[in-house]
Structures are given as structure tokens and as C-alpha cells.
Image: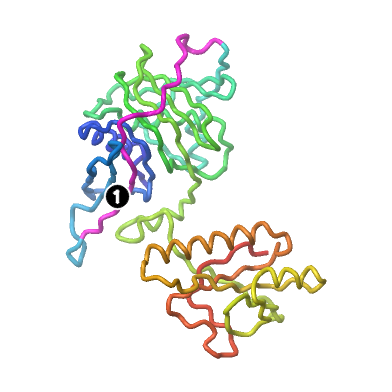
Amino acid sequence: MVIVPGTAFVELALTAGRHAGSPVVEELVLEAPLLLAERVVVQLQVTVGEPDDDGRREVAVYSRPEAADEDGGRVVTCHARGWLALQATPLVPFPVVWPPADARPATVDTLYTRLADTGYEYGPMFQGLRAAWHAGEDIYTEVALPEDAGDDGFAVHPALFDAALHGGLIDKDAGSTADLPFSWSGVRLGSGGGSRVRVRISPAEGSALRVDVTDESGALVVSVAKLAVRPVDPTQLQGARGGGQRSLFQLEWTPISVGSGAPVRVALVGDVGGAGEPFTDLDALQRTIADGAPAPDAVVVAVGTPAATDDVALAGRAATTEMLALLQWWLASERFAGVRLVVVTRDGVAVGGGSPDLVLAPVWGLVRSA
């Protein structure tokens, strides 16, 4: 699967922001991958909104196939969405001495072979890492485009920009899950340029990375205050082919084995109909278990009590808050380790319906199965 690198979307947002007078990508979240197929032309569109009181503008990147499908339509997909801003966080000084005096060389000769075994199969344009060093928690690298590659009018070439991230993969274990950029924060362009750059990759908040790129004279090319990555399974990308589901996230029904047919003890919490032992709330169920009763095999909880308001946004926020509180409480309770949680939503759907069999329609999610 040939995926357009996330750096291409960032470069598009940076260029649009520069033209609109908001040159910093304050945040850009990648919502869906853009997969390329042979002899299929894709059209791109970048939208920039009006500035708010702080000068921030919404930005989004969309695509659609140039050719219409059998029904005469063309599916439009949003690949990235975020905010442009006027100001960015202060730069961190880049070492004057190159490579840094305390840096230890790292082996990069077999890097792209090892990454191919992990799932990254970079083409010649993207195999830009030339040298690397460790210095404490920082990784320094030299990155270059092939000699026959031009800048093609980019503010920073996406292939060069992408290769600047590869230093963060040097210590990646063979056979581990492939990671893809997910969220970019505090991205700014500098005055430097060229096809050969120096890179520093440093730890940022949590598991995120900070990336600073300069040219060989030390002038800033591009800086990323925080880059967050997420593991991705190649099967998650299959839906992005053709006109199917484009998002990395999708709803799936997972078959559950019923086992040997042994009786299952079900606890019904709140206003839930069906076969099972009823409880007024989760605290009541927990007290019963504390008094010596065995934990049930499954707990069924109804979420989404009808709100006394016609404000859809307010009602949705209330239901989401209720769901979050339930999951936090459940995960913090050791008494329900190994117990399956079944969440029943209520959107005009009868639950129970007077039938002796438990009706779950629709089911939102299953959490913490044994």
C-alpha cells in the first residue's frame, strides 16, 4: 500500500498558512490516510478559515478522485484538520559543533532493511538517512535527498521532511508494530533550505517527539514542537482502498464464542430489562460482591438516559460524560477484573421489551473481557 506521508499534509498546511498570514501549524491531526493506486489521479484541496480574535485559522486537507465512480459521484475524504496560528513556542538552540562533541555514532547501514521487516518499505526518494548519533536522550542525524531530486517548489520537500523523522526509528525493535504520525503541534518553517539537512530528535511530552531541522549552515528549515505517533495495523488501512471506509477508525462486529453453553450469570444495572439479577446501581452490585457473593460473568449497564433538553449538543455531551465516568469507575475497580462490561445505548430503542431474553440494541462496546 502506497501511503502519502503525513509530512505532505503538514507542508500543504504550512504553505497555505504562509499565504494566509498564519504561518505556524499550531495543531494538525491526521484523520485518514491517503492511499495511492496506479494510474489513478487524485485531486487535493486545502481550506483555510477566517481568523478568530487571536489570529488562529482552521485548516483542513481533503482529497477526491479525479474520475467519477459508477454512480457519477466522487467520494471526498478529509485527511487532516487543525489550526494555523501567528506565533509558535520558542526554538531550542541547535548545537554549533557538528556532530555534537558528546555524540556516539549509530549504525544506519541496515536501517531501511530492518524497517522493511517491520512494515515500512521506503522507496529510494525516502531513504534519506545518511548518518546518526546518540547524545543522551537526543538523536542527531544527517538526511539528504537523492542527487537527482529537485525541490519541486515545496517549502520543505515532504520526502526530506519524512526522512528527518527516521532517526526516531533507529532503536525500533525488529518485528514491532509500525507507527504512523498522528498529531503535529507547533510546526514552523525557517529560512534555511537545500536538499541536505541536520536533524535533532528529542523526547517531548509523554511519548511524543520534538524535531528540529536545520541546513548545513545552521539555519532553521523546519521545527516540530511535538509529534505524536500511533501504531497502525496494515489491515486497518485496507478500508482506505477504493471508495470504502477511509478512516483509520471504524465500527466492526466481533464474533464471540458461546463456549460450552454453560449458564452465564448476568447482572442488570439500572433500568435494563431482560433475564438477569437486577441492581439499582453499580455501587449496590459492588457491595453484594464485597459481602461474599460471586462476581457475575457479565454486567449490563444502560447509558444515555434521555436528557430533559432539546439541545442535541448538550444531550450528546451529557451522554459522553456519563460514559466516560462509567469506564473510569469500571477500570479502577479491582472487583470487576475479568468481568465483561456490556453497554446498552438508548436512542429510541426498547431494551428488554418484556421478553424473557435480554435485548441489546444497539450495543456500544465491550470493555475488559477476561
Residue placed at 62% from the left, 75% from the top? 269
Is 341 above or below relative to 231? below
- Near-viewer residue (322 or 149): 322
Q: Is residue 309 above or below residue 137?
A: below
Residue farthest to the front?
308
Q: Residue at x 43, y 22 (%)?
A: 199
Q: Position of residue 75 (x, y in %)?
A: 25, 58
In the rendered image, residue 283, in percent from the top left (x then y), is placed at 69, 68
Crowding at dot 1, Cα within 10 Å, few <14 / some 14-19 / many 20+, comes out as: few
Q: Which residue is mark 1?
A: 37
In the image, residue 39 lies in the stretch drawn in magenta: no
Where residue 319 appears, x then y in whole percent?
48, 65
**Residue 299 occupies quadrant:** bottom right
Which color scheme is applied?
Answer: rainbow
Residue at 51% across / 12% down in the picture? 100
Comparing 242 with 349, the one in front is 349
Q: Is residue 186 left or right of residue 69?
A: right
Mostly what secondary structure, the magenta segment? loop
**Vertical position of residue 77 compared to residue 88: above or below:** below
Kindly identify the amino acid type of the residue bearing the numbered disc 1: Ala
Seen from the viewer's position, the closer of residues 61 and 331 is: 331
Left or right of 65 in this view: 202: right
Q: Which residues are magenta?
A: 74-101
Residue 52: quadrant of the picture: top left
Numbered disc 1: secondary structure = loop
Q: Relative to 238, does residue 134 appear above or below in the rendering?
A: above
Q: Quadrant of the C terminus?
A: bottom right
Does residue 83 show up magenta in the picture?
Answer: yes
Instruction: Identify the residue shown where x is 33% and y is 24%.
Output: 146
Q: Is residue 140 left or right of residue 72?
A: right
